[in-house]
Image (tube, coloured by chain):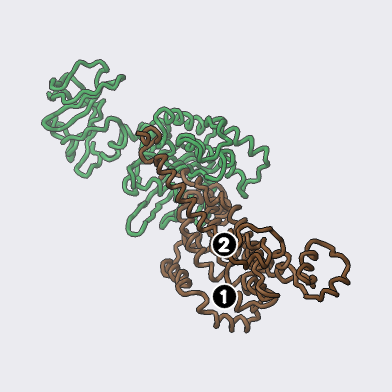
Chain colours: A brown, B green
Amino acid sequence: MSGLSSAWSVTEPSSRQKWIAGILVIGYALITMMPLLWVFLTGFKTPPDSISYPPKVIFEPSVEGYVNLFTTRTRVTPSQLDALPPPANFAEEIVRQRDMVIAGPSKFGERFMNSVIIGFGSTFLSIVLGTMAAYAFSRFRIPFTDDLMFFILSTRMMPPIAVAIPIFLMYRQLGLSDTHLGMILLYTAVNISLAVWLLKGFIDEIPREYEEAALIDGYTRFQAFYKVVLPQAATGIASTAIFCLIFAWNEYAFAVLLTSGNAQTAPPFIPTIIGVGGLDWPAVAAGATIFLLPVMIFTILLRKHLLRGITFGAVRK
Amino acid sequence: MADVRLASVSKRFGTTAALTDLSLDIEDGDFVVMLGPTGAGKTTTLRSIAGLDTIDGGDITIGGHSVAGLTPAQRDVAMVFQQYSLYPHLTVRDNLAFPLKSPLMSLDKAAIKRKVAEVAEVLHISHKLDNKATALSGGEMQRVSIGRALVRDPAIYLMDEPLSSLDAKLRSELRVELKRVQADLGATLLYVTHDQIEAMTMATRVGVLDKGRLVQFGTPRDVYENPASLYVATRLGLPRINALPANVFGAGAPSGATTIGLRPEHIRQGEGRSTRVTRVEHLGDQTRLHLDLDGHALVTLTDAHSALSPGDTLSVTPANPLWFDSAGARVG
């Protein structure tokens, strides 16, 4: 009886069902977030705390991991340490407790910026090319459309790394190895098929009448595309961009193979931190935490487009 | 505003002919209504003039110039779509202003604002200007879509069943409003509908389409009173014209006639053949009588306070009948 009185409609779940669903969702969220939370916490542990057994859940937070992430350090003898002037800042102070001094900044900042340039650059390029290709496939009569679409999809049918060696040789020949442009082009090439397929689906859903109305209202086809189709494809573009960014941002294998100095991204760099002065887990965890932030912020910023469903309804079907 | 002329226009979609040898002269200031059932080619005619569909043969001129090869924007036409096609990401105000902001128009902000306010006033949507286009009722959306055409001053307005989705009250209001706007502006309009009341009340000329061919073109009165064929006669008039074998009322049919067409008002009561009343529909202002004449159904009108009831006998005789041959063409 309580179910009857609380529900507005028979399709509305009862309050008990909502409770069960809520508990399941929260439970699932906790399980999936646990590793992330552990990484986040490890970033604020001292190196001894990070490898203590049994693992420490309660600990005294420290920013040593972050200091180690952004610096390179040299070990000094106690007598040398005593001869130094007092530490200039908190970072120096933390480092000296381990009988070391800061020798200079690490490469992390640079590698992180490489990730930003390559990740966002390839996402932007994938979306621009993908949207235009998807629009053409959706609206124009193109010979062999189905075959072409299948061909585009087929580029995803093998793992991209299978062509690593040809690409390695090709890039060396073209001078694209270890360049930002080379990595942007490579990630765009991998992402473009996904972008075309996803965006074609979204653009197919936008009725042609809008563009026809715009054409009659005095706009050219490109202006109609820009002013009428693009705003309505925003939802699709946002979700496609997130997929593209996540791939380019996390890609590891090609980055290891094709970049070393100039254009190295963060994923191949972060594990190398481990080798500098023992097993420095807090520094690795700090790097991973900072590395996660851009994708998280990007997703949160585009969230309203992902959830928005207001664009249908103005055409009577 | 300008003359629009279609000369022997034809259009095929694959193997189906959508328009066949269609010629039509729309004079400056005309309100032309195209009538015809679904699939007769009404919408294709509009789209061909607008440039959304390319024609396979013939020519279309607007203001004396051929528009072959011109983009829709270059043709200077405004169109109201049957599906409102409002831009869902824009407000009502921006929807109305959209054509005025096109690169072809060079209007300043104040002029755009004035135009939009004017049209919103006429169509009673001033209070909705800041709403999202999607947050409107069907009737409001359709008014905005008509408004989006009216803000401009094009060579011709093309309207594709703009009132079909509105409720009866709004439809009759907008019918009057559209006719008034057209008369005030001296606008040229090509209006497609299958609603004969819209055709009779608004049109200066009516064109009747049948399977992509223009079968008659004239004033509403002329098309109603002198239909070229039985098909045209059935498109106009409510209740529909009664079609019976030519000889049911005895001799008198012109040679070649096989069908007698009797509009409800062309049946005189009280003399002639006797019929049986099968149904009586009291509509308030009139009463429709369904009669049975030797197994043929007939519909006619009678006094609003008629005392007739089903089973009664009524004698009827034709007055001013129309005669048609076996192919449906008019004879005599």
Residue B183 pos. (x, y %) = 51, 31
Q: Earlier in the sequence, mark 1 or mark 2?
A: 2
Q: What subunit carries mark 1? A: A
Residue nearer the viewer, B55 or B248: B55
Snapshot quadrant of residue A221? bottom right
- Residue B181 or residue B4, whichever sits in front: B181
Q: Residue at x 63, y 74 (%)?
A: A182
Kind of residue sitting beneath label 1: Ala
- Reply above or below: A216 against A275: above
Apparent side of residue B15 relative to residue B133 in the rendered image (left or right):
left
Residue highlighted by disc 1? A253
Residue at image point 69% right, 58% down: A61
Q: Are marks 1 and 2 in contact (CB under 8 Å)?
A: no
Q: Is residue A6 above or below residue B101?
A: above
Subunit ID for the residue under disc 2: A
Is A103 placed left or right of B106 in the picture? right
Which of the 4 image quadrants contains residue B276?
top left
Q: Can the viewer see residue A253 in this picture?
A: yes
Front residue (pair A79, B260): A79
**Which residue lies most toward the front here?**
A54
Residue receiving disc 2: A127
Q: Is residue A180 visible?
A: no
User: Label 1: few (<14), some or many (≥20) within 10 Å?
Assistant: few
Q: Residues within 10 Å of mark 2 (few under 14, many from 20)?
A: many
Q: Position of residue B59 (x, y in %)?
A: 45, 53
Helix, strand or loop at label 1? It is helix
Provide the secondary structure element on which disc 2 rests.
Answer: helix
- Mark 2 is on which residue type? Ile
